[in-house]
Amino acid sequence: MAVYVYAVTRREHPCRLDGLPGVGPDAPAVRTLESGDLRAVVSDVSEEIRPKRRDVTAHQAVLERLLADGTPLPLQFGYTAPDDEAVRRVLDERADTYLDALDDVQGCAEYNVKAVQEEGPLLHGILDDSPRASSLNEEILAGDTDPRLSLELGQLVATEVDVRRANASAELIRALAPLARAYVVHPPTGEDFLNLSLLVPRDGEGPFLDAHAGLAREVDAGVRIRVAGPLPPYSFVP
């Protein structure tokens, strides 16, 4: 029977999994497979797993339980293997890689920081700081229909938006990165201009959250920072 794989841990991780239902329609029991110094946390599956809410919730619950007792290497939702032996074979073949990665994340959790800049305050700031943008805007508002004015203003604003977002991203990374063991900058999505994952030591979470709160008060008007965590270190799995 195929098996669904949630995470890899060290053999000594307690893996307190009693009572946790696994993913899939039958909510199978979650169990472990051991090989050498490693464990894989798995459950049996009888069909293809799709990202239904119940199954995503079950996946997250297993990882949160593991994270409470030590940092696992989490797998993304949906990873399956043909059978138990296939899982043990991968543990054997990649043992050194997994053990090194577990050393890297030991005692840490992932925090994800996203930032978005509201359009209104951003545009007002550009007009206040750029005499040329302000002049073009006034001419357009006064009724000048020359299309070159709108084109120039649009290009100027677009360039300034990119510069300001890049500067804000660099400032946030510069402030938060020293509080983490490692960090990864992901491509932002939607309206966000920053999508940053940080590997934060559990004994340093207080200073990290304090720094985040301070930045939320100090950054430019219209910039909103969101933080999620503690999370399993998805961004730091090899």
Image (cartoon, rainbow, N blue to C red):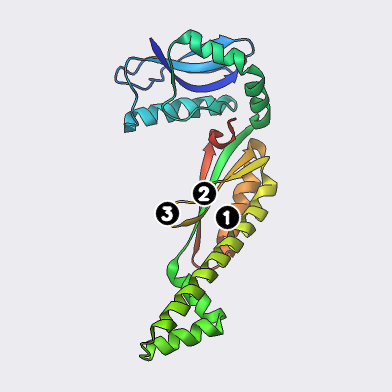
Q: Which one is earlier in the sequence, the residue at label 2 or at label 1? A: 2
Q: In this view, does 147 lie to the left or right of 121?
A: left
The residue drawn where x is 56% and y is 34% is 233
Give the amino acid type for the residue marked by disc 3 in the picture: Gly
> Within the image, what quadrant is residue 45 found in?
top left
Q: Which one is earlier in the sequence, the residue at label 3 or at label 1? A: 3
The residue drawn where x is 60% and y is 30% is 238
SS category of the residue bearing label 1? helix
Q: Disc 3 and disc 1: Cα gap in Å?
A: 23 Å
According to the image, label 3 marks what residue?
190
Residue 195 in percent (x, y) is at 53, 49
Q: In which quarter of the image is the N terminus?
A: top left
Query: Label 2 crowding class (10 Å Cα cut-off): few <14, some 14-19, many 20+?
Result: few
Q: Is residue 112 above or below residue 74?
A: below
Q: Is residue 176 visible?
A: yes
The residue drawn where x is 66% and y is 41% is 182
Of labels 3 and 1, the one closer to you: 3
Kindly identify which numbered label has been placed on residue 189.
none
The number of numbered badges drawn on the structure is 3
Q: Disc 2 and disc 3: Cα gap in Å?
A: 10 Å
Q: Are marks 3 and 1 in contact (CB under 8 Å)?
A: no
Q: Is residue 11 visible?
A: no
Q: In this view, does 153 lie above or below 76?
A: below
Query: Label 3 crowding class (10 Å Cα cut-off): few <14, some 14-19, many 20+?
Result: few
Residue 48 in percent (x, y) is at 33, 22
Q: In this view, does 192 lie to the left or right of 208?
A: left
Residue 136 in percent (x, y) is at 47, 85
Give the amino acid type for the residue marked by disc 1 in the picture: Ala
SS category of the residue bearing label 3? loop
Kindly identify which numbered label has been placed on residue 213.
1
Of labels 2 and 1, the one closer to you: 2
According to the image, label 2 marks what residue?
187
